[in-house]
Image: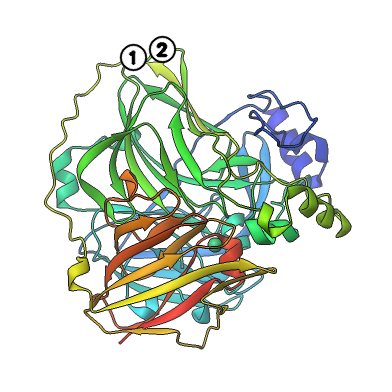
Amino acid sequence: MQRRQFFRLAAVAGLAPLVRPQVAWSAHPGHRPGAAPARPGALPRAPLIKPPVLRGPELLLRAQEQSAEIAPGVMARVWSPGPGPVGPTIEGRTGDRLRIRLDNALPESTILHWHGLRVPEAADGHPRLAIAPGGRYDYDVPLIDRAGTYWYHSHAHHRTGIQAYRGMAGLLLIRDEYEDRLGLPGGDHELPMLVQDRRLAADGTFEYEPVMHEQMEGYFGDAPFVNGIRLPSQDVETTTYRLRIANATSSRILRLALSNGASFTLIGVDGGLLEAPVTLPTLDLGTGERVDVLVSFAGERVGSTVSLLSAAFPSPARMGGMGMGRGMGGGMGGGMGRMGAGGVPQGGEMTLVEFRVTRSVSPVAWRPVPLPPLPLPEARRATKTRTFSFESAMMRHAINGRTFDMERMDETVRFGDTEVWTFVNDSPFPHPVHVHETQFRVLERTGGRAEVMPWERGLKDTVLVLPGERVSVAATFDSYRGRFLMHCHNMIHEDMGMMLNFAIA
Ligand code: C2O
Ligand code: CU
Ligand code: CU
């Protein structure tokens, strides 16, 4: 108690060394050459928390700057739409109607977007709807989507990245009768996980000053945060858990894996449950993507630990051609007053959550029950094909040569139509492409990985397009008429204008 109080005061007073994070995982090859990799576990793990759950029909989100505990005794300045370090988890059922009031007590304009939901234009959180400090926005959100793991985050103009990074994000879970039938692990055995990576500065704020190479590749933290908790651990029993994981990082691709080599049972993706589960040893998630997985600790000994990792992989970025590798970028950053030490680079291993097996129980047998066929849009019904080229060069991120203009209508789609959209990435960086207001089918990927990945065979609203890839999707625009967005979800790219407006008319 004494000690905790001391740390609290210390953090507020900004006594740096006490709260300074250490790198607490093995370094990626090539990361900070010469530096000895910090020993995993150099920092104590902090108990994972579940954000408080808010249910409708009326709910209030008050966005404010506040101090929140991100590890025992470690406080950080966050911007959050709730009392914790990230937003509360909003839960509803298909067919419900939520009335969400957002009060903006932040020092700048903001607006929230319900990622993955099909909602009326006025509820979609377009940046032109941002509200000034002291303002409020009332959302009317009919839940028409399927049971799934959705999320919400700031969509403020040029400020999405920093606001989401500081905590303006949360999970949004929808349930329905089909999900009910499955008897999935619930209660303490259901763990929603909003995954971020951040750098905690000595003064207790989250550092976010992208230097030049970070403005091109993206912003990477030096420690994983789940539900706003740094380096979390979770006590588990020897049974099956349901993990609902959202990649809410600024720019990081997560390669989910389990340290004991066990596989995940994938039951859902962005737009909800699959028709049947799929067993996979690893899953790649770009920013904005979600997975719903079952993990079994049934074979584990009490006292053992199993970690949920983002496993190491070679960065898909092709920076050689840009003439600006990390070294050079760091140099430029240094010229701008900081060494650009950076976080764990893209592809560096991170231990997201350490599961501690504390209790032996008789495991439940979960028998998969197939669900009805998914309403996947059909390419043969497409009335139109559009091609979007994602371009990153010369400190600019553009789509088909243009950066975002809030007032310009870039594309117009006829209400009710199905279209095929092809995302082309001839740029040096990965682009997780997100389309508002629809759940699409991934039809084809050519170049690069050259296949539709096993975790992309459901309804999706975000798809990762690596350098050299072309990905085609089929989408039906039959929810609401209005103005919506399509953009890269690397938040650095998005804020720099890799985004466009489309109308459903
Ligand atoms: Cu996750 Cu336009 O948003
Ligand atoms: Cu969205
Ligand atoms: Cu991008």
Front-most of 239 and 246? 246
Question: Dot 2 corresponds to which residue?
Answer: 302
- Label 1 crowding class (10 Å Cα cut-off): few <14, some 14-19, many 20+? some
Q: How many marks?
A: 2
Location of residue 479 (image quadrant): bottom left
Left or right position of 364 against 393 = left
Q: Residue 254 appears at what percent x and percent y? A: 50, 43
Question: Dot 1 corresponds to which residue?
Answer: 360
Instruction: Tell me what residue is drawn at x 69 percent, y 51 percent.
Output: 206
Seen in the picture, residue 337 relative to 238 is either above or below; the reply is below
N-terminal of the two: label 2 or label 1? 2
Instruction: Tell me what residue is drawn at x 54 percent, y 37 percent.
Output: 313
The quadrant of the rendering that contains the N terminus is: top right
Instruction: Tell me what residue is drawn at x 47 percent, y 19 percent.
Output: 305
Give amino acid for label 1.
Ser
Front-most of 260 and 49? 260
Q: Secondary structure at mark 2?
A: loop
Give amino acid for label 2.
Val
Q: Is mark 1 within 8 Å of ligand 1?
A: no
Instruction: Tell me what residue is drawn at x 48 percent, y 77 percent.
Output: 500
